[in-house]
Amino acid sequence: MTPSIAIGLAQYSDSHEIADMSRTLIEYGLPWTWRPGRIAREIAAPNKNVVVAKDQDSLVGFGIMEYLDEHAYLVLFAVRASTQRQGVGSAILQWLERSASVAGAERVRVEARRSNVAGRCFYSEHGYHELSIEPRRYSGVEDGVVLQKWLRNSGEA
Ligand SMILES: CC(C)(COP(=O)(O)OP(=O)(O)OC[C@H]1O[C@@H](n2cnc3c(N)ncnc32)[C@H](O)[C@@H]1OP(=O)(O)O)[C@@H](O)C(=O)NCCC(=O)NCCS
């Protein structure tokens, strides 16, 4: 990852760009459900972190993590196409996993579209294993794959 890219918490002003990236990179071919207002509510939620990677002022990636009782749930995650395969996704994921570990989560769960080979490879590379197939999970038209990773040193700062 280039040194000019910084990772930090999202601002409300990032909501539109995150929603646009979700529409084109995650929800392509499906109804657009992650609109700016919904993203803004995620930013405001006390039990969630919305994290962005920025190259100068340009938003190149984001991730949303929800903290539940025993595990954390990776809600939404993407890196801009022109910036992929440069380690940005790995850096965002590690940021979120460290936060989840500090928050006491023992494991992280995430879902991906069954056809999303790149995403499934990415999570596999980061130690996630596939738990189950959820039939027609996405708008009733595409199966989902549930993945999980056990965090080492969970509960330790
Ligand atoms: C999945 C995604 C977040 C990965 O982000 P990224 O910044 O490109 O990931 P990294 O550069 O950190 O990749 C780390 C490793 O993951 C694996 N990986 C990443 N993209 C891959 C691809 N297209 N095909 C195969 N393996 C891939 C590789 O092992 C890679 O290491 P390498 O580049 O040294 O071979 C990105 O492709 C993306 O935004 N996709 C669209 C949205 C999406 O699928 N979100 C996640 C599911 S909801």
Image (cartoon, rainbow, N blue to C red):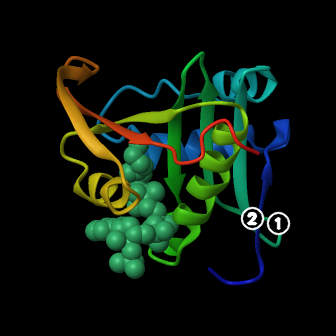
> On the image, numbered disc 1 is attached to which residue?
57
- CB of residue at label 1: within 8 Å of ligand 1? no
Front tag of 2 and 1: 2
Q: Quadrant of residue 57?
A: bottom right
Disc 2 packing (10 Å; few <14; some 14–19; many ≥20) = some
Image quadrant where one finds the N terminus = bottom right
Helix, strand or loop under label 1: loop
Q: Position of residue 25 (x, y in %)?
A: 43, 50
> On the image, numbered disc 2 is attached to which residue?
54
Residue at image point 74% right, 64% down:
54
Residues under numbered marks 2 and 1 in contact, where contact means CB atoms less than 8 Å apart: yes
Helix, strand or loop under label 2: strand
Of the four image quadrants, the one with ligand 1 is bottom left
Camera-nearest residue between 116 and 150: 150
Determine if residue 81 is in view. no
Q: CA distance from mark 2 to mark 1?
A: 6 Å
Q: Is residue 151 left or right of residue 39?
A: left
Q: Amino acid at mark 1?
A: Asp
